[in-house]
């Protein structure tokens, strides 16, 4: 695939992510509206969110003005080169910023200067994996700042939570993050969790959980059960959409694991707001497909 | 849904209760960090008449300029708590009847709302497109050069702007209530 077409396809991927809410998220919000029941103000908030998403899609404008950080998860076969993909993705990012699809969101922490085009050290954030089969798979997450701020990392045991070094301890950490977030991360949110790993890999893997479909089932039956229990427990907190109260506090709980050092037990919780922006694409034999419209 | 037309009287604002869903029509003004500091510490003469019996919107919009006409492209609420040190004095000094933002505010603002007849309203976070559409006209802008686009004070005319009263003029705050309520559940879940 030539460089021009690759860049064009990646631009389209960014446009889709920023301006259209994925079908699994829409479906989860509809379930929320049904759960809140007729006439509930929490239901009205969810309906406003869906209406906003619809208008954004029709007008090709960002769902939220904070278009977030760009996280690219890439798998590429022998017919692609990492450097080329990265260059094309950077060029696509600059163009998306120029066309108001993305807000300039990359700020130098020392000088305070905004790069103006979303490029800078660590921005976009790339995760590359090589594979044997030909072709390319790119999954993009746009992660907003307000919800990124409410994420947290724990080190078990945790005395404050009376959380031990076991699955029960992991459960308590997740409850703590969602309680502390209240409405500040623009609830209802989705939590991606990693139990184990080192401090860096753990947060990375918690973000990768956010690439899962909201309707899927965790292949690990123990984690699958914990996810179900937590869905119920977290929605019972009563925080609700925007934190105004209600039965819909989270739209999904996705938990992964990584082996840990005997001395370390980290739990990393990444939170994304309802403006859960993701888009996936595949390239096979020169043909580009997106997972949804 | 209760309709509120700006400018609004103290009497009408005092009728509103925490939890009320309202729809606002009229002229209001955006203000973030730089504007709040300015309103309290220095001038404010230029916007004094506009603020009386009107509302402040915590918002850093994306603004499009065509010719010499401005319009809002994306205009969701920003986090309000940053203005907590300033909001009480702003309400007292200018006779503001409503403050719109997200996430709620603290005890000083709640007290000022009770003393001067004002409410805090939450707009739904992330409603960038919908809320930008309810801004039907940008009438004027103050301090654009000095503060930049997101921080400038934009004088806007809104139609049917949706918001929920989450802090009323009778000392009630939905934010405090939800936090307390969820705290109880949270403690139960941790004990389990
Ligand atoms: S948390 Fe999400 S919805 Fe809320 S302002 Fe940030 S990006 Fe937008």
Image (tube, rainbow, N blue to C red):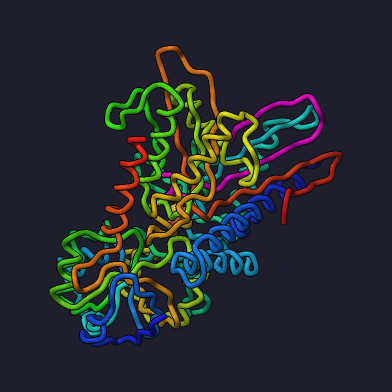
- Name which quarter of the figure residue A166 lies in: top left
> Residue at left 47%, top 54%?
A188
A256, above or below B164, in the image: above
How far across and down, in percent of the image, does residue A286 sit?
84, 42
Left or right relative to A216: residue A269: left
> Residue at left 38%, top 78%?
B22
How far across and down, in percent of the image, does residue A161 sit?
31, 32
Q: Classify the position of the C terminus of chain A by image quarter.
A: bottom right
A111, above or below B97, in the image: above
Q: Classify the position of the N terminus of chain A by image quarter.
A: top right
State the residue in front, A186 or A133: A186
Instruction: Determine if residue B152 is in view.
Output: no
State the residue in front, B36 or A150: A150
A163, above or below A252, in the image: above
How far across and down, in percent of the image, does residue B140 sit?
37, 80
B186, above or below A19, in the image: above
Tell me the magenta residue range. Answer: A126-148
How far across and down, in percent of the image, does residue A226 sit?
52, 35
**Is residue A139 within the magenta segment?**
yes
**Is residue B50 within the magenta segment?**
no
State the residue in front, A236 or A210: A236
């Amino acid at each position: 695939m030539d460089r021009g077409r690759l860049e064009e396809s990646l631009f389209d991927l960014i446009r889709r992510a920023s301006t259209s809410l994925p079908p699994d998220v829409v479906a989860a919000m509809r379930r929320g509206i049904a759960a809140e029941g007729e006439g509930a103000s929490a239901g009205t908030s969810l309906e406003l969110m869906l209406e906003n998403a619809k208008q954004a899609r029709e007008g090709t404008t960002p769902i939220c003005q904070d278009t977030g950080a760009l996280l690219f998860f890439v798998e590429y076969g022998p017919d692609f080169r990492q450097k080329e993909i990265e260059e094309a993705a950077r060029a696509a990012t600059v163009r998306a910023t120029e066309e108001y699809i993305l807000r300039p969101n990359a700020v130098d922490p020392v000088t305070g200067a905004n790069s103006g085009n979303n490029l800078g050290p660590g921005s976009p954030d790339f995760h590359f994996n090589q594979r044997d089969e030909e072709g390319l798979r790119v999954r993009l997450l746009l992660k907003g700042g307000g919800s990124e701020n409410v994420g947290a990392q724990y080190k078990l045991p945790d005395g404050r939570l009376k959380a031990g070094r076991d699955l029960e301890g992991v459960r308590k950490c997740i409850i703590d993050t969602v309680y502390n977030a209240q409405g500040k991360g623009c609830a209802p949110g989705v939590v991606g969790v990693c139990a184990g790993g080192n401090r860096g890999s753990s947060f990375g893997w918690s973000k990768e959980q956010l690439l899962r479909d909201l309707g899927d089932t965790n292949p690990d039956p123990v984690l699958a059960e914990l996810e179900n229990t937590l869905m119920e427990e977290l929605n019972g907190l009563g925080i609700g959409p925007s934190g105004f109260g209600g039965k819909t506090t989270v739209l999904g709980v996705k938990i992964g694991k990584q082996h840990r050092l005997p001395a370390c037990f980290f739990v990393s919780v990444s939170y994304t707001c309802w403006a859960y922006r993701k888009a996936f694409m595949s390239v096979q034999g020169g043909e580009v497909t997106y997972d949804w419209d | 849904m209760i309709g509120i037309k700006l400018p609004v009287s103290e009497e009408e604002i005092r009728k509103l209760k925490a939890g009320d869903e309202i729809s606002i029509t009229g002229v209001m003004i955006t203000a973030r960090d730089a504007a709040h500091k300015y309103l309290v510490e220095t001038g404010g003469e230029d916007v004094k008449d506009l603020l009386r019996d009107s509302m402040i919107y915590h918002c850093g919009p994306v603004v499009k300029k065509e010719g010499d006409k401005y319009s809002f492209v994306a205009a969701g609420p920003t986090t309000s708590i940053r203005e907590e040190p300033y909001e009480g004095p702003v309400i007292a000094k200018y006779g503001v009847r409503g403050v719109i933002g997200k996430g709620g505010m603290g005890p000083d603002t709640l007290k000022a709302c009770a003393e001067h007849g004002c409410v805090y309203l939450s707009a739904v976070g992330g409603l960038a497109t919908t809320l930008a559409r309810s801004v039907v006209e940008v009438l004027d802008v103050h301090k654009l050069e000095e503060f930049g686009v997101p921080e400038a004070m934009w004088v806007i005319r809104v139609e049917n702007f949706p918001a929920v009263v989450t802090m009323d003029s009778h000392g009630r705050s939905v934010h405090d209530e939800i936090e307390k309520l969820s705290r109880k559940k949270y403690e139960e879940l941790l004990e389990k």
